[in-house]
Image: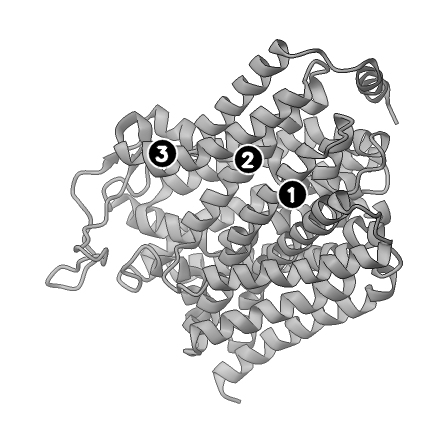
Amino acid sequence: MNSSLLTLSAMALYLIAMIVIGVYFAKVANEGSENFFIGGRRLGPWVAAMSAEASDMSGWLLMGLPGVAYWCGLSDAAWTAIGLAIGTYLNWLLVSKRLRRYSIKAGNAITIPEFFSNRFKENKKIIMTISALFILVFFAVYTASCFVTCGKLFNQLFGFDYRLMMLIGAAIVLSYTLLGGFLAESTTDFVQGVVMIIALIAVLVTGTIAAGGIDSVVQNAKNIPGFFEFFGIAKPVTDASGVQQLSASGTALFSTNAGSYGLLTIISTMAWGLGYFGMPQVLLRFMGIRTTGELTKSRRIAMTWVVISLAAAVFIGILGRALYPNALLTSSASENIFIVISQTLMNPFVAGIMMAGILAATMSSSDSYLLIASSAFARNIYQSLSKKEPDDKKVMTISRIALLAVALIGIVIALDENSIIFKVVSFAWAGFGATFGPIMLFSLFWKRTTHAGAVAGMLGGAGMVFIWKLLIKPLGGVFGIYELLPAFIFSCILILIVSLATKEPSKEIQDEFEAVKAMTD
């Protein structure tokens, strides 16, 4: 059988399995909106942990992060990974149990906007509407990054038209998410998390052996100025269009002077970890687990998965330079290094399973984004603004329409096949982290947080992401830091100042806060 056909067959079998899972959970999902959006709070610790991390990492883990390591070396990728690992741990440790208890106490909230609204006892649903709108905006961008991954994958593997493959990938994700809702999405994400870590380890081991062992890979990396340093960064020599130049002998050229990677840059890069406090796809797993006590086990499972997966992804980019130093000559193309290693070193059918790992990463994220965005519109905009309370069936119908609409927006954004996944994801990540992260922490841990402070923090954090990214960051120097860090700090300052400057929360809100704080189960 043709090698491409074998690879395609393995990927097709995987995709069919995901759709079958959606069909299996369709009956449960259609019992009501609580089942559709949060699975009736019946996730086990393994599914909660693995689905949270798989939905969080997306195709960025298998393509974006190795691509950064391949293009400019260890520092940028490694410090990002370290920040993410720390952020993951703190989120599970500090937020998970308190949010699980508080979301039930605060009117049995089943979405993040609903939790914020109930937490502050809103009448006019201002926070709910703002939260839902930001979720729609940033998840449309996130969804686009996933569709870009699908298109790039099939284009690189089989030469298929990028846009056609991007559309097919979007259609498959839509099918099982529309059918099975949160339980289908979480179960498929669990499966996809398993596939992702197996694929990462398999490609890492196979590639290291082919490169002559770890010592050989490390030595090659050290021969490139700044490539294997924590406090330096390699600088590919590129032409005006961003294509890396080759020497007369065909060797990829790097500047002989490594770039500096100072403390400010490290702090900026590690700031990726702050994003976790505001990631709806992770926070919903905390809310959806069966019991609060199972979150400790989930945290250990999640951290094991995260540390192994991030370390493997970074090292795959490093060993990729040893194996194929001249194969990928642009920053965008470098994101295909996982594909190149799998395709050239593995049996075609096995390579197809590895490629399913990328599909798994992509689909596990896009299904989460679509479901959360649709719930934001149906439950938190349509339902809250309707003059007459719509029945549950109508809400679910509206959510499915919204799901299709968000997918279409993502498809339009993803039409540009030259999109760099890492950059697309980094902007959306900053948006969520600065919009929801500070107010989530203040809502859970500071009784004095007021409604006005929450609104100011959310608007200020989101606005600063755009202002810093578009107007301040281009100035360079100390202003060239990742926009999440200044936006997160700005949001915290606004919440603090505005809350202290406005009337303290009602006795009802404060009593509820103290009741949640006293919970131990």
Q: CA distance from mark 3 to mark 2?
A: 25 Å
Looking at the image, residue 500 lies above or below residue 164: above
State the image coordinates of residue 478 (x, y, percent, origin top left). 30, 25
* CA neighbours of label 2 inside 10 A, class few (<14), some (14 to 19), many (20+): many
Residue 308 seen by the camera: yes
State the image coordinates of residue 398 (x, y, percent, origin top left). 74, 58
Residue to which mark 3 is pinned: 230
Type of amino acid under label 3: Phe
Looking at the image, residue 22 lies above or below residue 512: below
Q: How is the image coloured?
A: one colour
Q: CA distance from mark 1 to mark 3?
A: 39 Å
Name the residue nearer the viewer: 397 or 295.
Answer: 397
Name the residue nearer the viewer: 456 or 233.
Answer: 456
Q: Secondary structure at mark 1?
A: helix
Mark 3 vs 2: CB contact within 8 A: no
Question: Picture quarter containing residue 132?
Answer: top right
Question: Picture quarter containing residue 371?
Answer: bottom right
| Residue under the image location 32 percent in, 51 percent down | 71
Left or right for 379, reference 58: right
Residue 482 seen by the camera: no
Q: Secondary structure at mark 2?
A: helix
Name the residue nearer the viewer: 399 or 78.
Answer: 399
Which is nearer the N-term, disc 2 or disc 1? 1
Residue to which mark 2 is pinned: 433
Please state which of the two labelled residues, at mark 3 or mark 2, is closer to the viewer: 2
Type of amino acid under label 1: Ala
Type of amino acid under label 2: Gly
Residue to which mark 1 is pinned: 132
| Residue under the image location 61 percent in, 35 percent down | 278
| Residue under the image location 42 percent in, 64 percent down | 341
Which is nearer the N-term, disc 3 or disc 2? 3
